[in-house]
Amino acid sequence: MSHGLTLVEVVIALVIVQIGVLGALSSLTLATRTLSEADRLETQIVEMTTALDSLAMVPNPNSGERLSAGGTIRWSTRDGALLVWHEGAEVLRDTFYLRPGARRAR
């Protein structure tokens, strides 16, 4: 009776370890991509919210646009609402109602 591992057992153990390492690397890549996407979305939302806050101070804002880091921020007024959207990789929208009881825009 010999003590130790055979070559086949060592190869099987190395394959199992390799599968685990590849799974961990795959998860790390996905997490990095998701974090990057979340960071980009947060930047766009902050830029859009800043524009919305600035426009809310103006008595009768006009339609317009402004270039931002991730795309273009555009705004317009309709039915008592100030519509603000960010056009970048995808379009983000938000609505601010200028006067109480204004009709909800869809």
Image (spheres, rainbow, N blue to C red):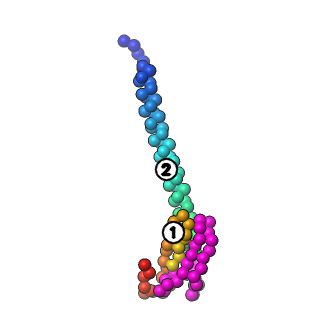
Quadrant position of the N terminus in the picture: top left
Residue at 49 percent of width and 74 percent of height: 94
Q: Position of residue 40 (x, y in %)?
A: 55, 61
User: Label 2 sits on what residue type?
Assistant: Leu
Q: Residue furthest left?
A: 1
Q: Which tag is nearer the camera, tag 2 or tag 1?
A: 1
SS class, disc 2: helix
Q: Residue furthest top?
A: 1
- The tally of labels here is 2
User: Label 1 sits on what residue type?
Assistant: Val
- The Cα atoms of the two marked residues, 2 and 1, are separated by 23 Å
Q: Residues within 10 Å of mark 1 (few under 14, many from 20)?
A: few
Q: Position of residue 11 (x, y in %)?
A: 44, 26
The answer to whether residue 46 shows anywhere in this view is no
Q: Earlier in the sequence, mark 2 or mark 1?
A: 2
User: Mark 2 highlights which residue?
Assistant: 30
SS class, disc 1: strand
Looking at the picture, does residue 58 appear above or below residue 13? below
The answer to whether residue 30 shows anywhere in this view is yes
Residue at 59 percent of width and 65 percent of height: 70
Q: Quadrant of residue 52?
A: bottom right
Q: Are marks 2 and 1 in contact (CB under 8 Å)?
A: no
Near-viewer residue (89 or 38): 89
Residue stretch rendered in magenta on the structure: 54-82
User: Mark 1 highlights which residue?
Assistant: 91
Quadrant position of the C terminus in the picture: bottom left
Near-viewer residue (90 or 28): 90
State yes or no: residue 80 in magenta: yes
Residue at 50 percent of width and 46 percent of height: 28
Q: Position of residue 67 (x, y in %)?
A: 63, 71
